[in-house]
Image: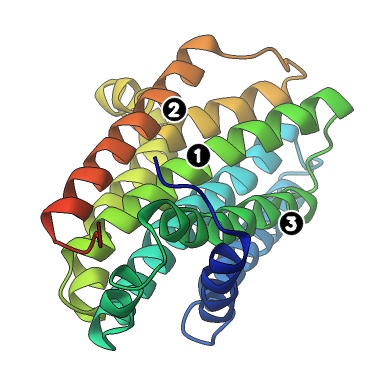
């Protein structure tokens, strides 16, 4: 296995950070924070009209929507479209045929977007007004990190397969909608409820529900689901990466 050179990894990280904070991509995590704030206001208004106070269940619903949208949109779209943009501008092939090895490229591509998703999940929690214990925060951050990794690798797969940004945006729509819509509408259909348990965003939503109910125990089944999907995504990425011929050696 090739080693990691800090200078080369740092160069890739710097390039990826600049891309994430460009006007084309920063709107996605900001949108997740905004939709959480809007849903909280909506639920507050509905509760006030009914002469009730804002319940923890409603706060959890606002957080669930914001967190799943953040994990799905930021992870898949930002990662996939940034890779596709590099392919369009021929910077990806230059990286792959340079002294930057595959592991450095993978880590440099995944770490910035994962860090952004975790930070945004912290922000949407604060915006939603969900109060967590210290152990609850630890569990929430840990699960958010794992889900962010799964989403980021999925985005890398779609980005490498896509010919350009438009294609990346189009092909990303289906998995993004699945990861957002099924968990948030699972309560309306038992089949969707079962499917949601096998999606990492569905596990994320289950954690939110448990935390709001003050149950901060680790869901081992959910943990297995997330880890299994991460492993599967990494294996698919390695296959696609090599098949596309970008590995320099």
In the picture, which quadrant includes the C terminus? bottom left
- Measure how far apart labels 1 and 3 are at the Cα level: 16 Å
Instruction: Tell me if mark 1 has few (under 14), some (14-19) or many (20+) residues whose alpha carbon lies within 10 angstroms of its own.
Output: many
Residue 126: x and y in percent read 79, 51
Locate residue 17: give its quadrant. bottom right
Residue at image point 57% right, 81% down: 18
Q: Residue furthest right?
A: 134
Residue 110: x and y in percent read 48, 55
Q: Does residue 80 lie above or below 4 as drawn? A: below
CB-based contact (under 8 Å), mark 1 and mark 3: no
Colouring of the image: rainbow
Q: Does residue 199 lie above or below 150 as drawn? A: above
**Can see residue 199?**
no
Front-most of 43 and 229? 229
Instruction: Tell me if mark 2 has few (under 14), some (14-19) or many (20+) residues whose alpha carbon lies within 10 angstroms of its own.
Output: many
Q: Secondary structure at mark 2?
A: helix
Residue 246: x and y in percent read 21, 64
**Can see residue 108?**
yes
Residue at image point 44% right, 17% down: 224
In the picture, which quadrant includes the N terminus? top left
Residue at image point 79% right, 33% down: 137
The residue wearing badge 3 is 123
**Residue 69 placement, left or right of 242:** right
- Measure how far apart labels 3 and 2 are at the Cα level: 22 Å
The residue wearing badge 1 is 147
**Residue 145 placement, left or right of 102:** right
CB-based contact (under 8 Å), mark 1 and mark 2: yes
Where residue 226 is drawn, which disc sits there? 2
- Measure how far apart labels 1 and 2 are at the Cα level: 7 Å
Q: Nearer the viewer, mark 3 or mark 2?
A: 2
Q: Secondary structure at mark 1?
A: helix
């Amino acid at each position: 296995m090739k080693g990691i050179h800090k200078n080369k990894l740092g160069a890739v990280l710097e390039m990826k950070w600049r891309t994430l904070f460009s006007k084309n991509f920063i709107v996605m995590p900001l949108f997740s924070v905004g939709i959480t704030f809007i849903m909280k206001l909506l639920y507050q208004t509905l509760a006030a009209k009914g002469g009730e106070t804002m319940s923890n269940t409603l706060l959890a619903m606002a957080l669930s929507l914001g967190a799943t949208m953040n994990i799905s949109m930021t992870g898949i779209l930002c990662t996939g479209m940034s890779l596709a943009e590099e392919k369009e501008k021929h910077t990806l092939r230059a990286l792959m045929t340079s002294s930057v090895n595959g592991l450095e490229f993978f880590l440099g591509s995944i770490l910035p977007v994962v860090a952004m998703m975790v930070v945004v999940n912290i922000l949407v929690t604060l915006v939603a007004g969900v109060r967590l214990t210290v152990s609850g925060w630890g569990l929430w951050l840990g699960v958010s990190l794992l889900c962010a990794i799964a989403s980021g690798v999925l985005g890398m797969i779609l980005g490498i397969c896509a010919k350009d940004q438009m294609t990346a945006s189009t092909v990303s729509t289906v998995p993004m909608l699945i990861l957002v819509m099924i968990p948030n509408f699972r309560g309306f259909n038992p089949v969707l409820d079962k499917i949601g348990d096998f999606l990492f965003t569905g596990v994320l939503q289950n954690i939110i529900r448990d935390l709001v109910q003050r149950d901060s125990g680790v869901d081992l089944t959910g943990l297995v689901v997330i880890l299994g999907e991460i492993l599967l995504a990494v294996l698919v990425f390695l296959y696609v990466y090599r098949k596309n011929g970008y590995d320099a050696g």
